[in-house]
Amino acid sequence: MTKLPVTISFTGVTNLLGIIGIIGSLVFVGMELRQSQQIALAAQQQQRAALITEVIGTFSDANPPISFLDFLNQTIDMDDKNNRATTETYMYRVWMIYENDHLQHKLGLMDEDVWQAKLTSMRAIYGMCQYKEVTRFALSYSSQDLRETLQGSGPNPCP
């Protein structure tokens, strides 16, 4: 049995190892970037949750406290100055949060499922006729794209 001479040059082996090293490095960097993005998305979600919880706390800080469920059911007496001030402050703040959420979604900093949940909430608040004046005012300071997104979701039931 005759052996065939196999010649492998040192340069060829070095080049092959270099290519494998580069590919390994790129895979590692890709995994690190993916992990960093997931951490950033989680941090953004945590900040959004903390902020909206703080804003909802506006109702319990009122004197006397207002039920958030009464707000959602639109059964708050808006003739009471305290109720009106608390509710309008909440509405204005929540629309500013939604504007920020819209921007974060456009920049890819929000998971699509979270965005869809936010959009559902936005549409519900957009359709709360009792609070239409403050919604109209807050949205006048929002981006045209956000207003178009809300208007594209169907006609606003509030005249």
Image (spheres, rainbow, N blue to C red):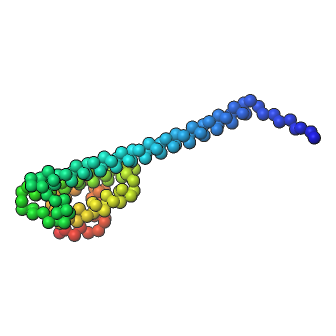
Q: Quadrant of the C terminus?
A: bottom left
**At 76% from the left edge and 31% from the top edge, which residue is drawn?**
9
**Looking at the image, which residue is at 12% across and 55% down?**
65
Q: Position of residue 108 (x, y in %)?
A: 40, 50
Return the x and y of residue 46 as percentages of the image width and height.
33, 48
Q: In the depicted view, which residue is nearer to us: 88 or 151? A: 88
Residue furthest toward the left? Answer: 80
Please give the name of the residue rendered at 16% of the width and 54% of the height, measured from the top-left corner: 59
Q: Position of residue 52 (x, y in %)?
A: 25, 51
State left or right for residue 138 relative to residue 28: left
- Taking 95 as reference, is 33 left or right? right
How far across and down, in percent of the image, does residue 1 sit?
A: 93, 41
Left or right: residue 58 versus residue 18 is left
Q: Is residue 26 above or below residue 70?
A: above
Look at the image and tell me whether residue 114 can be seen: yes
Between 78 and 158, the one nearer to me in the picture: 78
Residue at image position (39%, 56%) is 112
Is 48 placed above or below 119 here? above
